[in-house]
Image: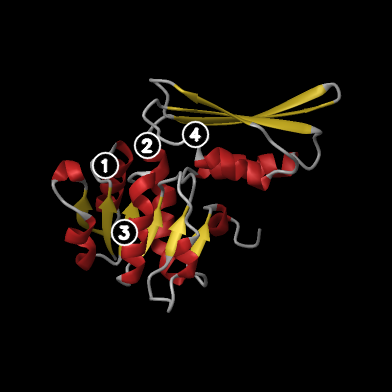
Amino acid sequence: MRVGVAGAAGKVGQAICVGVEEASDLVLAGRADPALGTSLSDILGDCDVVVDFTRPDTALDNAIACVEAGVHVVIGTTGFDPAPLREIRPRPPGNAFLAPNFAIGAVLMMRFAAEASQHMAKAEIIELHHDAKLDAPSGTAKRTAELMDGDVPIHSVRLPGLVAHQEVLLGDVGQTLTIRHDSTDRTGFVPGVLLAVRRVADQDEPLVVGLEQLLFPAA
């Protein structure tokens, strides 16, 4: 399978490129990034799947370009509305998969938080990211809150030295419960990205959101 990476010069993009190159069933077909002097259009014709870790203001246009060209797209960029990807008609052969977080531990954290919220009175989320992250609250925090029962406030922290971290704090009479996930290196996103790359072509829907759909398909 020929895989292109949009945002290939970024920290996550570089880790994904290495992961693709090390996978025996994948070929790194192209790297698109302004820092490399290459655009998505330069690599699109060589790819079966494109992985997008770019910016909120470019990710949707990138995804539409992929899908309309019949190329599947796996999106890790957050901070934009992906709904137009459901509406492209007639449906071309390209599918889109989007996950707010590709770290498998983060998906487990979201699942546990959703279950715990059914049994605890109230909850709040604190999400902490590096100071270059453009969107706040994070896509992971918003997705977590969507999955949980009740109105769950989100607090965002942006500081140098952080990567990606989230705490879900739940409280009830005489007790609290904290569920936390920490990404300490961008390589932690690679296994989830490669799982989506291998599965995106088999989707029944033009857009699937959330890595939990692959890890827990019956959920």
Q: Residue at x 42, y 29 (%)?
A: 163
Q: As drawn, is 181 to the left or to the right of 22?
A: right
Among numbered discs 4 and 2, the one appearing first in the sequence: 4
Q: Which residue is mark 1?
A: 14
Image x and y of residue 152, in percent: 69, 36
Secondary structure of residue under mark 1: helix
Earlier along the polypeptide chain: callout 3 or callout 1? Answer: 1
User: Gap between marks 3 and 2, in whole Å?
Assistant: 18 Å
Question: Which residue in the protein does label 3 denote?
Answer: 50
View extreme (left): residue:
37
Disc ID at residue 186: 2
Indicate whether 202 appears above or below 81: below
Q: Residues within 10 Å of mark 3 (few under 14, many from 20)?
A: many
Q: Amino acid at mark 3?
A: Val
Mark number, residue 148:
none
Amino acid of disc 1:
Gln
Quarter of the image for residue 9 reads top left
Residue 104, visible in the rendered structure = yes
**Is residue 108 visible to us here?**
no
The residue drawn where x is 72% and y is 32% is 123
Residue contact at pointers 2 and 1, CB within 8 angstroms = yes
